[in-house]
Image (cartoon, rainbow, N blue to C red):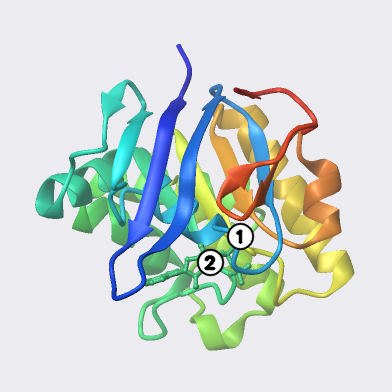
Amino acid sequence: MSLITAKHLEKTYPGDIPVKAIRGIDFTIEPASFVSFVGPSGSGKSTLLNMLGCLDPPTGGHLTVSGQDVSALRGRAAAEFRGRHIGFIFQDFNLIPVLSVFENIEYPLQMVQTWPQDERRQRVETMLAAVGMADQGHKYPHQISGGQKQRVAVARALVTRAELILADEPTANLDRVTALHIISLMKAMRDEFGTTFIFSTHDPKIVSSAETIFTIEDGRLAVGDIDGGSHA
Ligand SMILES: Nc1ncnc2c1ncn2[C@@H]1O[C@H](COP(=O)(O)OP(=O)(O)OP(=O)(O)O)[C@@H](O)[C@H]1O
């Protein structure tokens, strides 16, 4: 079963002149995929990622994530679905400055899932080791580098064992070598945990490492994408 199925998916922002940001697109994404959405500024990438992340509902069509039709999810139901199934990675890392590295990774386990303390600690330690930060858990975000911050963000996104990670320009604030390390870390995480990573990016390093590339132009999928997933 596909992890994501979009059928005639649409998003129109209301207003005096409504903006048709996504104009009826169809695609599927399989579990354990490494997928990149690319396209010019304003083409609809963020709008699409926000729908996939159940942050903003579609205005038409259907969207299934992890076997559930999420098109109609709103408010608390959408938040609970996100907490169980989806992790997010941001270009500016979004770590909480007053929490240690360990506590930042633990945070989703406390906020959206109620795990006993011992299991939480074990999970966080496993993730710290998986991202090569086993001895850094006591530090605070201001005491670690940009690349290390993004490692922590990857661990935090994966700690709930989300099936889907959405990453908006995750390498935008990293130098080339660090960006390449983070990309290979995410791919290793995909291999180890079977997580699907979906990127919205302009970074050619991510695009060249993606196994499926969807190009969005003016709210539609362009033909001729490198395949792995599929679209009509
Ligand atoms: N909240 C909103 N209200 C109205 N229009 C919006 C809103 N968000 C985005 N848009 C419009 O929808 C279209 C798609 O925008 P979107 O942000 O999805 O593009 P993008 O491909 O992510 O661009 P970028 O690469 O610059 O981030 C644009 O015309 C944009 O102006």
Q: Residue at x 75, y 62 (%)?
A: 202
Q: Which disc is residue 43 wearing?
A: 1
* Residue, disc 2: 90
Front tag of 2 and 1: 1
Image quarter (top left, top right, bottom left or bottom right) of the C terminus: top right
How far across and how far down the image is residue 221, in percent?
63, 40
Residue 218 in the image: above or below residue 118: below
Q: Residue at x 46, y 24 (%)?
A: 3
Amino acid type, mark 1? Ser
How far across and how far down the image is residue 110, in percent?
22, 56
Asked whether the viewer can see residue 185, the reply is yes
> Left or right: where does residue 71 sit relative to residue 114?
right
Residue 15 figure quarter: bottom left
The answer to which of marks 2 and 1 sits earlier in the sequence is 1
> Left or right: where does residue 61 sit relative to residue 188?
left
Q: Does mark 1's beta carbon lie closer than 8 Å to ligand 1?
A: yes
Callout 2: few (<14), some (14-19), or many (20+) C-alpha neighbours within 10 Å?
A: some
Image quarter (top left, top right, bottom left or bottom right) of the N terminus: top left
| Nearer the observer, 104 or 220 | 220
How far across and how far down the image is residue 111, in percent?
20, 58
Amino acid type, mark 2? Phe
Q: Residue at x 29, y 76 (%)?
A: 16
Tell me the distance, in whole angstroms, between the alpha carbons under discs 2 and 1. 19 Å
Callout 1: few (<14), some (14-19), or many (20+) C-alpha neighbours within 10 Å?
A: some
Q: Residue furthest top?
A: 1
Residue 184 in the image: above or below residue 43: above
